[in-house]
Image (tube, rainbow, N blue to C red):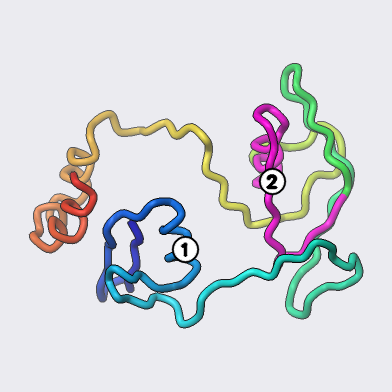
Amino acid sequence: CCLYGVPGAYGVVSMPFSVREGINVFLAGFIPTENLRFRDTALSFKVSETADDNDVAPGTKQYESGDMKVVLGGFTLNIEAGSFQDSEIVVMLGENGTGKTTFIRLLAGVLKPDEGDGVPELNVSYKPQKIAPKFEGTVRQLLHLKIRDAYLHPQFVTDVMKPMMI
């Protein structure tokens, strides 16, 4: 589902999309099934095989960090010094157990390095791989408990409950 709206004005909950479709809708800024544009321009990315280390795009910030080491039980993650700009999109791919999650937890400030200066202060949104819910009941029970008035409203039922099949 794509959720879009303006607080206190309106909200739209689209029908569910596949992951690929949902990403494409987000990048395009347009929900075709609703005929709704939620962003004036589409997001597009320029792919570069090589980058000049000295080129810092105007209006962007350069982040640098030194060598670091994280030890978790019998696992050791060695991180080499490096840099990136806030305009860059960095993708990490690798086999299970190679340290991708550990590295992200380090960037998010959840972990501190055992050796090295640490990472520069970043705004990292970190979602754990395993979520431990605090509420023991169903989604329906949680909505009824927390937002009873909205939960019972016909518009909420039409826009949220039915599309989410709750």
Q: Is residue 9 left or right of residue 116?
A: left
Q: Residues within 10 Å of mark 2 (few under 14, many from 20)?
A: few
Closer to the eye: label 2 or 1: 1
Q: Which residues are magenta?
A: 82-108
Residue 16, percent across and down?
31, 54
The reply to whether the magenta stretch includes residue 96 is yes
Q: Residue at x 28, y 62 (%)?
A: 14
Q: Amino acid at mark 2?
A: Met
- For residue 92, the mark is 2
Mark 1: which secondary structure?
Answer: helix
Q: Residues within 10 Å of mark 1 (few under 14, many from 20)?
A: some
Calculate the distance from the C-alpha at mark 2 to the C-alpha at mark 1.
20 Å
Where on the picture, by quarter, is residue 75?
Answer: top right
Q: Is residue 130 left or right of residue 63?
A: left
Q: Residue at x 33, y 73 (%)?
A: 6
Q: Residue at x 68, y 51 (%)?
A: 91
Residue highlighted by disc 1:
24
